[in-house]
Amino acid sequence: MDRIRVLYDAGGVLVLDKPPGLETTGRTRDDPGGLEHHVTARLGRPVWPVHQLDRDTSGVVIFVRRKAAVAEWQERLRRATKRYVAIVHGRMVSETVDAALAYDPELRRWVTRADGKAARTVFEVLDGRDRASLVEARPATGRTHQIRVHLASVGHPLFGEGRYREPACVEHPRHALHVRRIEVDDLAFEAPLPEDLRELATRLGFDPR
């Protein structure tokens, strides 16, 4: 857990800055790759994730120290404002994508489809170039891969995107998505842009601050 930064630890709530390359869940010896496992081993007692991030998504993730608190915090997160930083292909414009998502077993990935579950994401362009844009994404719903699918559906997949871009992007070793800030009730948790995304942003001509 040495490379996992603690952002908040009080009142039975543990908020971490998740590095890329770790699953959120997984606590057993048979599943040693999960953040949950690393935290449990370090603390010597179990913790429970309130939500999950993709393996290669970095940033703010919330755990609780009592299983009974999971439902309460999941409800609080439904009212929360989540702010992601995304680095995407092409010059994007600020827009709201309101497109339902469904899992396609043949493609083995999520797709936008009218009969899927409602999903809505607000995208605000922070800086744009012909080749790439630096974007803040604010999901209003919490569907699996929601931001990634919505970006791809409007023609602006993430740098490093392997599943929702054809051909897969090989310009960055992971998809360029980071949970920068979660605002829930009277609390706010913030994780700075990690080094790999700062370097990518600088290379593309953006101010990583």
Image (cartoon, rainbow, N blue to C red):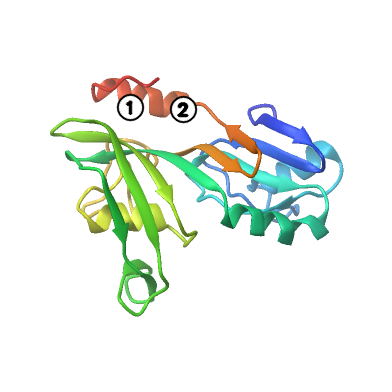
22 left or right, relative to 135? right
- Disc number for residue 127: none
8 left or right, relative to 78? right
Task: Give coordinates of residue 36: x percent, y percent.
Answer: 70, 48
119 left or right, relative to 206? right
User: Can you name the residue that lies furthest to the right here?
Assistant: 44
Question: In the picture, which quadrant includes the C terminus?
Answer: top left
- Disc number for residue 200: 1
Callout 1 crowding tier (Cα within 10 Å): few <14, some 14–19, many ≥20: some
Task: Give coordinates of residue 151: x percent, y percent.
Answer: 29, 52
Q: Kindly indicate the quadrant of the structure image that contains residue 110.
A: bottom left
Q: Kindly indicate the quadrant of the structure image that contains residue 85.
A: top left
Which of 75/62 is in front?
75
Name the residue type under label 2: Leu
12 left or right, relative to 153? right
Q: Residue at the spot x=50%, y=59% of the render?
A: 142
Between the C-alphas of marks 1 and 2, the distance is 11 Å
Q: Residue at the spot x=78%, y=49% of the render?
A: 47
Question: In the picture, which quadrant includes the N terminus?
Answer: top right
Residue where numbered disc 2 is placed: 193
Which of 192/163 is in front?
192
Task: Give coordinates of residue 109: x percent, y percent.
Answer: 37, 66
Can residue 175 be seen here? The reply is no
